[in-house]
Image: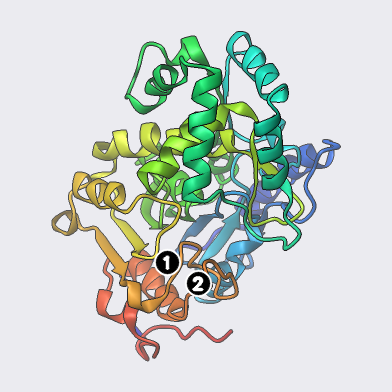
């Protein structure tokens, strides 16, 4: 078994009870909302009072998913000495994403006339009806040609749209608030609230997350460097992958066009993706310097269809790279590892992660020693010196 460098702590009964009470109050607020989302409740795994632990890990799931997306990782960390808290990312405890999830919308005085034009346009209405017709319960994402066609049609209806989109593309554009209403900062304020629920739990606290949850894990680590000791981010969404996809999300996002995510019963407006991308850019990428004091482990894949690879690689350099105590691994294309890489049962583009067990092991190694053996990540055989993944 590998030697850990962490001093073990033993939370008292009072500390654990106070933490449970804070989380219970959060759950009560969810219960009081008629739009609560089945199966999206936060949960925790805490060892008994007085039992030595290695710290507490906050685990954040991916966009449109639920906390149990990460249950195998949470259980592995818990079985091997950590307490774990898995909240939902902002708004995801509720249905009705257009109302409850972080989103970017065009201001009503711009959006309403455009929506009327869209409703009166038979070509667009036919397109949107075809896009919504999904009988296979799979993720609905328009093709490259569909996105180009939609952008061209929308620009015909509203010639100002390319100019408006520049307000999203540019950092700190003064016209952003003129054109848009945005709740993208909700990802950070909600993560702060969830971290506050652990205020009675003794340090250290760690964060880990997938996709948008990865950007949340990074953002709260940058925001609270005195509290978060280390961070693990799997394919964090700091920018939408692919120039054409980014343009589509930025152009169509504020127009109430909907897609289907990992929950087959829940459609979300593309504006929620626009908000997630802006959050990753403004609250993570642009604040990379704040993470230079927090060791960070990033896991990426060449088979990416959501998070921009070059942006993640540049971000890794901005936080200091390996010379600053960080690690970054990219699964090569031949390994057939998709973006949702944490749960081995999740299939995307016909791929699933067959290397998930060694990925869990290296997550444990990094959290406990601040080191990672990147060669082990491409092995299908677990390292016998690390706790075994037994699912």
**Which image quadrant: the N terminus?**
bottom left
**Residue at 57% of width from left, 33% of height from top?**
271
Mark 1 or 2: in front is 2
Of the residues under marks 1 and 2, which one precedes in the sequence? Answer: 1
Viewed as shown, does residue 44 lie left or right of 279?
Answer: right
Viewed as shown, does residue 263 lie left or right of 391?
Answer: right
Give the structural element (helix, strand or loop) at label 1: loop
Mark linked to residue 40: none
Looking at the image, which is closer to me, 117 or 282? 117
**Residue at 41% of width from left, 51% of height from top?**
307
Residue under label 2:
81
Q: Is residue 15 above or below residue 68?
A: above
Residue under label 1:
8
**Residue at 29% of width from left, 49% of height from top?**
294
Q: Is residue 331 visible?
A: yes
Give the structural element (helix, strand or loop) at label 2: loop
Looking at the image, which is closer to me, 10 or 96? 96
Residue density around tag 1, few if under 14, some if 14–19, many if 20 or more, within 10 Å: some
- Contact (Cβ within 8 Å) of mark 1 with mark 2: yes
Residue 366 sits in quarter: bottom left
């Amino acid at each position: 078994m590998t030697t850990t460098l962490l001093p073990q702590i033993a939370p008292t009964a009072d500390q654990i009870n106070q933490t449970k009470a804070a989380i219970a109050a959060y759950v009560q607020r969810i219960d009081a909302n008629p739009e609560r989302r089945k199966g999206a409740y936060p949960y925790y795994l805490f060892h008994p009072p007085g039992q030595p632990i290695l710290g507490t890990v906050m685990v954040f799931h991916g966009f449109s998913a639920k906390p149990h997306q990460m249950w195998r990782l949470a259980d592995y960390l818990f079985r091997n000495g950590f307490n774990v808290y898995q909240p939902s990312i902002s708004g995801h405890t509720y249905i009705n994403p257009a109302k409850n999830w972080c989103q970017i919308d065009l201001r009503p005085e711009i959006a309403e006339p455009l929506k009327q034009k869209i409703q009166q346009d038979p070509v667009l209405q036919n397109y949107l009806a075809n896009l919504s017709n999904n009988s296979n319960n799979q993720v609905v994402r328009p093709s490259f040609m569909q996105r180009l066609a939609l952008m061209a049609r929308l620009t015909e209806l509203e010639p100002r749209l390319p100019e408006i989109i520049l307000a999203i593309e540019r950092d700190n554009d003064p016209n952003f608030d003129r054109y848009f209403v945005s709740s993208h900062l909700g990802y950070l304020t909600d993560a702060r609230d969830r971290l506050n629920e652990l205020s009675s739990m003794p340090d250290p606290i760690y964060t880990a997350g997938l996709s948008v949850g990865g950007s949340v894990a990074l953002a709260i680590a940058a925001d609270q460097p005195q509290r978060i000791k280390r961070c693990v981010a799997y394919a964090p969404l700091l920018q939408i992958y692919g120039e054409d996809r980014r343009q589509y999300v930025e152009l169509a996002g504020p127009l109430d066009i909907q897609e289907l995510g990992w929950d087959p019963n829940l459609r979300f407006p593309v504006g929620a993706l626009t908000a997630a991308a802006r959050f990753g850019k403004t609250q993570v990428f642009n604040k990379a310097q704040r993470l230079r004091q927090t060791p960070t482990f990033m896991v990426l894949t060449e088979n990416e269809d959501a998070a921009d690879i070059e942006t993640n690689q540049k971000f890794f350099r901005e936080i200091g790279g390996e010379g600053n105590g960080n690690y970054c691994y990219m699964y090569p294309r031949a390994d057939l590892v998709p973006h949702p890489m944490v749960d081995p049962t999740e299939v995307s583009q016909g791929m699933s992660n067959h290397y998930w067990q060694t990925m869990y092991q290296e997550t444990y190694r990094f959290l406990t020693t601040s080191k990672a053996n990147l060669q082990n990540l491409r092995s299908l055989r677990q390292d016998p010196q690390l706790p075994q993944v037994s699912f």
